[in-house]
Amino acid sequence: MKINDLAVRSLKIVLAASLVSSYGSALTIDEYIQLAKQKNPLLKSYEMSVEASKIKADSSEIDLSPVLSAGYQSSTDQSRPSMMGTKRESQVYNLGVAKKFTTGTLLKVQAQSGQFDNSNVSLQGFDHYNTGALSVSVQQSLWKDFFGEGTKVKIDRQRKTAQLEQFSNELQARAVLFDIESNYLDYALAFEDYKLKKANLDRAQKIDKWTSNRVDNGISDRADLMNSKALLALREAQLISAEEELKTQESKLRDNLKINDEEKTPEIQADLTSERPYLSVLKKTKNVQKIESYLSALESEVKSLVASETEDSLKPDLNVFGSYALTSYNRDYAQAMQDVTKTDFPQSSVGVNFTWMFETTAKQSVRTASLKEAQASQFKAEKKKIDGQTAWNELVRKHDVLKKSVATLDKAAQFQRERAKAEQDKLSKGRTVTANVVLAETDAAEAEVTLLRTKSQLRKLEASSLLFMEVQE
């Protein structure tokens, strides 16, 4: 690892540790998400998989990369006596470069040299000699991979497969982020609900104490006292329930931040009134789909390319080829290498190769199966696309409805608070009964809780737009 990379990594660890240990200020939702990203190993794995998939897309043309080949062969042949002697020794060197093009053309350039020593030769001058050759060969596909069609399909299939892996990991990473953000909102709701229930209990205790004094003084009857005590018991039960929910959500939040048992849970700066940015950004774009729908479309394209690739692989193989070589021959090795570029002794050849697999049930089954899979995937993608567009429209509609609901519930909660306050004032002046105060208190508390829950639902709905994306047609 480089020193700079190590320094950056150490700095991130120090910053994360300082956040967890000190929490000098309350965490906003964005600070919490960034910290959770650093702490969540599953999210890290998905992010690394996304990067790996992007790199795979760049490697789709690996088959078109130039290939360097080099070889050396030493041999001794004493099998049977021949005109070349009873013992034949040779050393052969070769060096070449081959390159395949998108047109299906294979080009190869090769240089070769050989040293030959023969014992007891019958022909004079063949006891020792050296050869050299410099050749160029070309091969062109004419049926299977017709002028590179199959090669292009393979490259497209590898690219689409890499994109499919990339967006699949991206979807899983966003799903984790949505869960992390939802937990923050649930904890914020539970915390606000707990404070609200505690305040409700405090008010119920004051009403109970005030009513008890009135009963002792003979101003109120026992029915009012039982009514206030019932309200107090109800508020105590609600506080217990709210406290349990707060502990549950706190445990999830601590898990997301990987906080040790000895460390304190950080305070959060939750603002349920602030809109999350994802949805508003997507609304400004034209073509929005669920990532799941886009994945289905990519899968359909991959299956279609696989079918085309399969069909091409089953075609007859017809190739034309040609080669041209310059050769040299001399008893002196250096002179043989020097003469290799001379055109005095050329070699040339042209030819054609044809292979064909007989039509069998197995061959037909392979072709038919790939076509059926491609068609099935296409039908699935079309349905997913419609469902994705419907889901987006429904998300936008629900968001508009919830925004209006929040505004309405905010007014209702304010009216209920004013009503409860007015009833308490009337009760202190002896102008109403305790039952009216209890009813006003209950309605006000329920209105506050409903408003909090609706705000949380609105923020969660905005966060769920993480599972959507703009698609370029």
Image: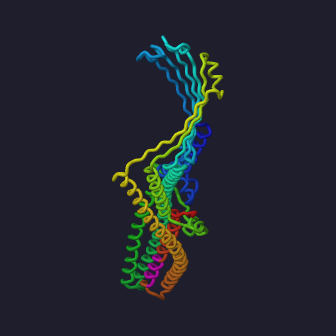
Q: Nearer the viewer, residue 263 or 75?
A: 75
Q: Is residue 59 magenta?
A: no
**Main SS, magenta residues:** helix
Q: Residue at x 46, y 44 (%)?
A: 354
Relative placement, left or right, of 129 versus 363 is right
The spot of residue 418 in percent (x, y) is 53, 81
Q: Is residue 328 visible?
A: yes
Q: Nearer the viewer, residue 173 or 324?
A: 324
The picture places residue 311, in percent across and down from the top left corner, at 44, 54
Residue 445 is a magenta residue: yes
Q: Residue at x 49, y 73 (%)?
A: 394
Q: Quadrant of the N terminus?
A: top right
Residue 207 vertical position relative to residue 92 in the rendered view, above or below: below
Q: Residue at x 58, y 56 (%)?
A: 25
14 up-or-down from 421: above or below: above
Magenta stretch in the rendered image? 436-446
Q: Is residue 468 above or below residue 401?
A: above
